[in-house]
Amino acid sequence: MADADLRTSAAWRVLDGFGGSVRSLARSVSPASVEELAQVFAAARAQGFQVSFRGSGRSYGDASLHTGQLAVDGRAMRRILSFDRERGILEADGGASIAEVWRRTLPEGWWPAVVPGTMFPTLAGCVAMNIHGKNCFKVGPFGDHVLELDLLTAAGERLTLSRASEPELFRAVIAGLGLLGAVTRVKLQLKHVDSGELRVRPIVTRTLGHMFDTFVEQIPHSDYLVGWVDCFATGPALGRGLVHQANHLAPAEDPGGAGTLAVSAQELPTSIMGVPKSLLWVLMRPFTNDAGVRFVNRVKLALPEPVGKDGTYRDTHAGFAFLLDYVPNWRLSYGDEGFIQVQLFVPDASARDAFAEALRLCQRRGMVSYLGVFKRHRADDYLLSHGLDGWSLALDFKVPRDARRLWDTAADLTRLVLEAGGTYYPAKDQVVDAASFARSLGERLERFRNLKQRLDPGGLFANDQARRLGIV
Amino acid sequence: MSLVFRRAIVVGASSGIGAEIARQLAAGGCAVALLGRRADALEHVAAGIRAGGRGSALVRVHDVTAYGTVPALLQQLVDEMGGLDLLVYAAGTMHLPGESEYDFARDRSELETNLLGAVAWTTPVAAMFEARRAGTIVGLSSIAGERGRRTFPAYSTSKAGLTTWLEALRNRVARHRVNVVTVKPGFVDTEMTAGLERRPMAISATWAASLILAAASRGGSPSVFIPGRWWLVAMVLRHLPSRIFRRLDI
């Protein structure tokens, strides 16, 4: 691969964001080893290509797009290298996915400490975006559970980084958007679990304030908390929704718990009421419009979930965590133009007002989100991190035919976040402008750029998003 | 709604149907890149286009079996024309082996030109069109691809392969609004068919080219016979049992 002419030998690949609303053509290679990857870097440098990284393509926007350049598909490097079942420490290639990790470790009683809403992202992707889960308020983001990682730099040098050995670089690579090099190996601390199930308590919230209050009240004794917001509700019902609170089960609570640790006990059902789930997105399509979502939201709030006498039900780890995988290809139900997500990260002090204003703003503009998801976060110390002591509201918007309306609304939301002292999350982003991004990060962006200059002086690593956000 | 082509690449534009398609595109105001092996023949076509005063013509000498040169050449042409709406793959050769002649070298070269060259060109162009969610690819296959023909075995094989390739491509990119058009002419009066003893229902290259462009600009990824009446012949040919078909002198 060292002397391969990438222009003639690399595959063509149309890359899209998970939202399906942005796509671009790139050349793609899929190295099978770190040595091959180093050769790709050398060939790319020699032939004038810039390099970006692509894992499972779960970032919503243009984070893994790279128009006309070289995208390295990391999925060929996906071995689980070792697993210490006593201490719950797992080492794997960067291209291994969360799914590959939990399927290996859960039968032994270990679950990844932080998982996103889908099981498909790669570990390297989770590191690069510093993803979070429904337990961010309690255990922090993904990076907090990385013990060590290997970085292959532009020069082909392999660095082993940890919080102790290389604190500065470690904190820059996590949430570093893949701009400092390839994360080729990740060593993770997992969480011990006694049962394959969680106890889940649904709580209906009548207003946005009630949603905040419910979180505040539940946080001290919850392992997971996530809120769903009906973005169509107006007036006194603004921000009404549903909170799902979940806890791990102690051995005493669930004597047969070990049986549910098996992978087969976790797998999501393949059909719902007889309809194969692979076709379900087609049936969702008639509902992905204002009237349809209004209707679905009403039904969701009116129909109580089946709970036991104590107001809870049991759900598997996979079932509770990976809601985005529940209906395969659901994103296609948004139609040809796809959808975008804007996730507003706002500090605790200003979040209540900011989210209420965001919901009203969308309604005023007639550009209402079809899915609102609410979470609590905590601050972290990664250089480009979006993490803060505050809250997030993730809003999914269908891209309308007259897309201008959406871009204007998104620009308003971008401004609103900045004014509230908030941050932007590149894994979701497709709309933020360079000036707003720079202001949200302050001097941290310059520190990151200096570090990049040191590690990647030739500017080998880039992607469409990094260019849009003005990082490279 | 009919598609308007403003920038086109015609591979195999030095003579025959390819040259006619290039002329007619240019006459409609389209910028056309003419590709082929013979510089003088390409220049001749280009000169005619320039003299016509409409559209414009770029000439690039190109051997479709130099697969490695395709990506860079494509990029260069797209940059120069400021985009691409249409690719026409019209490069093709037809060799008629003698009664008991078996020649791998010639058959291979025919498969490379007629089939692999088309794969080499349509691959990056399909990817580009998918990313942009627009564009038309026209492949010149042939009615000869409907059956294995003893008179031109490699030719009929290459065209069968091309028809299938284009169908596969169409099935891949149709949902991305890319228009893939398979055209299957019967006999057309060109240099290539000059060596054939009989050419029933032959039409001129000019007529064939205008039917092809009409089919391409209709959109909807059609697969058509040129002219349409060959459809009936193809139906009959396809359903003839092999033991009868092999006795026919076609």
Image: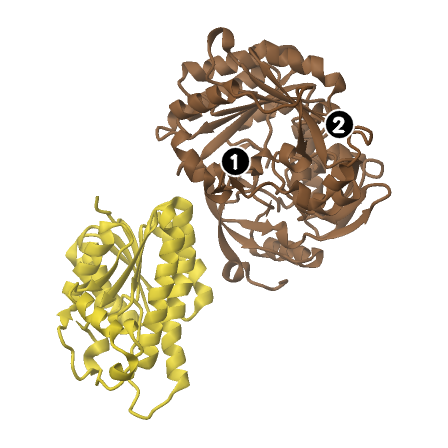
Chain colours: A brown, B yellow
> Which residue is situated farthest in the right direction here?
A86
| Amino acid tagged 2 | Val
* Residue corresponding to mark 2: A139
Q: Position of residue B108 (x, y in %)?
A: 41, 79
> How many circles with numbers are drawn on the protein?
2
Q: Is residue B185 above or below residue A187?
A: below
Q: Secondary structure at mark 2?
A: helix
Q: Is residue A444 left or right of residue B111?
A: right
Q: Is residue B113 above or below residue A172?
A: below
Q: Quadrant of the N terminus of chain B?
A: top left
> Does the image show residue A132?
no
Q: Is residue A452 above or below residue A92?
A: above
Indicate the chain on which mark 2 is placed: A
Q: Position of residue A45 (x, y in %)?
A: 61, 53
Indicate the chain on which mark 1 is placed: A
Q: Does label 2 or label 1 sit earlier along the sequence?
A: 1
Any mark on residue A61, and which? 1
> Which residue is situated farthest in the bottom direction here?
B100
- Label 2 or label 1, whichever lies nearer to me, is 2
Circle 2 packing at 10 Å, graded few (<14), some (14-19), many (20+), is some
